[in-house]
Image (cartoon, rainbow, N blue to C red):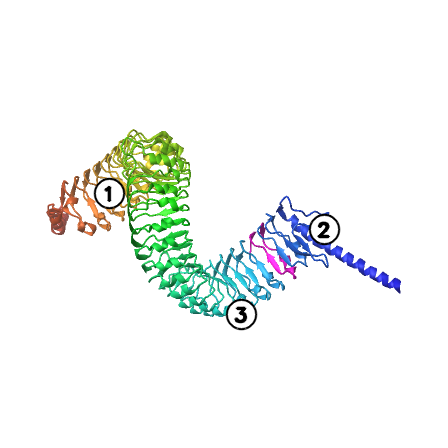
Amino acid sequence: MENFIFSFALSIILLNSFTLSLNSTTDKYALTSFKNSITSLPYAFNWSQNTSVCDWTGVSCGLKHGRVTALNLSGYGLAGTVAPHLGNLTFLRYLDISSNSFAGILPFELSKLRRLKVMNMGMNSFTGEIPTWFGSLPQLEELYLFNNTFVGTIPSSLVNNSMLKTLHLYSNQLSGSIPHGIFSVSSLRDIRIRNNSLSGWLPNDMCNNMPNIKILVLSHNQIGGQIPPNIWKCKRLETLSLSYNNFNGNIPREIGRLRVLREMYLGYVDGFQGGIPIEIGNLSRLEILHIDHASLTGDIPSSIFNISSLRVLNLVQNNLSGHIPSNIWKCKHLENLGLDFNNLSGNIPPTIQNASMLRELYLGSNLFTGELPQEIGTLPMLESFSLSGNSLYGSIPSSIFNSSTLKRLGLSFNEFSGILPSDIGHSSINLKVLLLTYNKLSGQIPNSIINASKLTILEITGNSFSGSIPYFGNLKFLQRLLISENNLTGAEFPTQELTFISSLSNCRDLKYLDVASNPLNGLLPASLWNFSSSLQTIKASNNNIMGVIPPQVGNLTSLLNIYMDGNQLRGTIPPTIGELKQLQRLYLGRNQLVGSIPHDVCKMNNLGELSLSSNMLVGPIPECLGEVKSLKMINFGSNLLNSTIPANLWSLTDLVTLRLSSNNLNGPLSSRLGNLKLIRWLDLSANQLSGDIPGSIDGCQTLDLLNLSNNLFSGPIPQSLGKVRGLITLDLSYNNISGSIPKSLESLHFLESFNVSGNKLEGKIPDGGCFRNFSASSFSHNLALCGLIKFQVPPCPEYHHRSWVKKLIVPSVILGLLVEEVILVLYLKQHFLMG
């Protein structure tokens, strides 16, 4: 008997051992097959066949049976597909292969993982539809499929997962409606399906069966309808995000009954009607509230500021009106207040100083008036403050510039006056952005500003600052410097170099420099062209700058824009300018440049706007310009250019503006002119162009202005001009044009300015359509025009005479001829019979 018991026990042990070995082999084979489907493995990935699978990287086994219960390979940089053999890990409870580069579809065999509680496939590149077999995993509690490229609809079979607590499907390409049955899964606590293309609407009973939901994130979709009023039944809701959808109607007042709500996002919903419900003030635990870009109207309920826990309030870009509630001081923990782009009015309440935790305060683009309270400067934590675009006046409180925490200050587009504190830079040690454009500030720019050594953006355009410009070269991190439209000077004598520009060569991060419209009155320093290669825009128009453009200009290879028109630059345009391969706009007009236009400008393949007008340039227009297909604007007016217009210039089909006026250009106008399908402004006046005006002009259908005056054009005005329906200005004066004025021009309904004086025109002046608005000056000094008295030309009697001839004499003559012919026939007939 004892032997039998021993033998039986031994058999059981051997059987279990065999079973465990067999099961272990099954798991090992499944994992090996999974590994073989991976195309990219990290160096330290240890899945040796000589060791137990329980010792493999990312693998965990159960202590009792030695089966694989968890596979965690998150963030290993793996790539490939998921082998169907993974479905043979039947004891698996935890599967996480997130944050890799897996692709393809999820195999059906994974539906055999009946013990699975957590599946995380997020942040991969899986495709196809979300499999319906997810609904057959009875133990599933957490499902993460976020940041993939799943398409199609959300399967309704997910309703079968009665133990599901977490569902993350965000950042895919899902469409259709959210299955309403999902909102009846009572175990759900966390739903995140943002960043898809879901539409439809939310069911009215959405929260009836989700008493445990804590996080509901459906933002960045296309969900419409109203927010269900019964949302208050989701009594444990802590985070609600419905932003970027198509909701309409009112924000339900019942939302104020979500007493444990901490975060609420309802922004970017243009369909909201009405205002902010005062019941939101009952959300005593609310910390973050975003209802921006939502078309809300009415006042800001003062009840909001009774929420002592509030840290972030963002109501930017609505239509809110009224004043900022004075009880704002009750929000002791408020860190971020955004009220930009509304219709708020009144004064900035001094009580705002009691919101002592404020870090970011945005009040720009409203209707605020009055003076800025000194108390703003006493906010001890303030880092960003924007009040641009209001109607505030008076001095800027010096206390603001004494803040050592302030990083960004925007006060542009107001009516602030006075001077800046002389010690502005001493306390503003962390200031990075200072925006004071378009105010009424005056005095000098304090030299102490260079002590604000962290400044990256300084914009003071459009004020009345005067005196010399500080040595900005100490601001090593400066990226944007805009000091245009002031009364700043750069040199004591016109023969001195502009040293402040030289100092800017130390600002190695400078990208945008605008000093335009200041009386700088100095020489352009050669060091300008030693600037950092990061410089993208130079604006130095209307500065009375003298000197030459040095060859080193070609070193600034990152330049996108050069505006140096309206100065006294002399010399030639250096050929090295062609090295600026990225340049998009070049403005050198209204200077004293001489020589020819270098062919090297044709090397700038990204050039869109080229203006060299009002100089003393000679020679031909470079023919190679026709190869710079990016050109949209050419202005060579008021120079001494000669020869003909290059033929391939008419192949620039994106050209919008072409101004070649006041030169010595000659020859005929090409019939290829009609290729300029986008041209709006064509001015070739005051040249020596000759020949006929091409009939192909009707190809320029977008033309607003056509000026061919003061040339040698001959022949008739083309009838086809009447088809250029958008013409506003048409000037053909002082040429040798003959013939009559085409009646087709009456159909130019937008024509406001018309001039054909000083030609050889004759015949009747049209008197219909746009011609009713023109005066005699449009037709003076022609050969034989006639028409209405208001045009100060003789009447057209020949018109009536010809009409009478046509109506009476001509028919009579025809009748007489017929009678004569009948008599002749009768005579011949009689003569024939008698003969």
Ranked by sequence position, the earlier of labels 1 and 3 is: 3
Count neighbours of disc 3 (C-alpha within 10 A) and say few if under 14, some if 14 to 19, many if 20 or more.
some
The numbered mark at residue 663 is none
Q: Specify whether residue 592 is painted magenta.
A: no
Residue beneath label 1, please? 718
Ranked by sequence position, the earlier of labels 2 and 3 is: 2
Q: How many marks?
A: 3
- Where residue 400 appears, x then y in whole percent? 36, 51
Q: Specify whether residue 109 is painted magenta.
A: yes
Helix, strand, or loop for circle 1?
loop
Magenta part of the protein: which range? 100-128
Q: Is residue 55 left or right of residue 201?
A: right
Helix, strand, or loop for circle 2?
loop
How far, Cα to Cα, is label 2 from label 3? 46 Å
Residue beneath label 3, please? 209
Count neighbours of disc 1 (C-alpha within 10 A) and say few if under 14, some if 14 to 19, many if 20 or more.
some
Of 374 and 721, the residue lying toward us: 374
Count neighbours of disc 2 (C-alpha within 10 A) and say few if under 14, some if 14 to 19, many if 20 or more.
few
Amino acid on which the number 2 mark rests in the picture: Ser
Whether 431 is drawn above or below 6: the answer is above
Do callouts 2 and 3 mark residues in contact (Cβ within 8 Å)? no
* Quadrant the C terminus occupies: top left
Residue beneath label 2, please? 52
How far, Cα to Cα, is label 1 from label 3? 78 Å
Do callouts 1 and 3 mark residues in contact (Cβ within 8 Å)? no
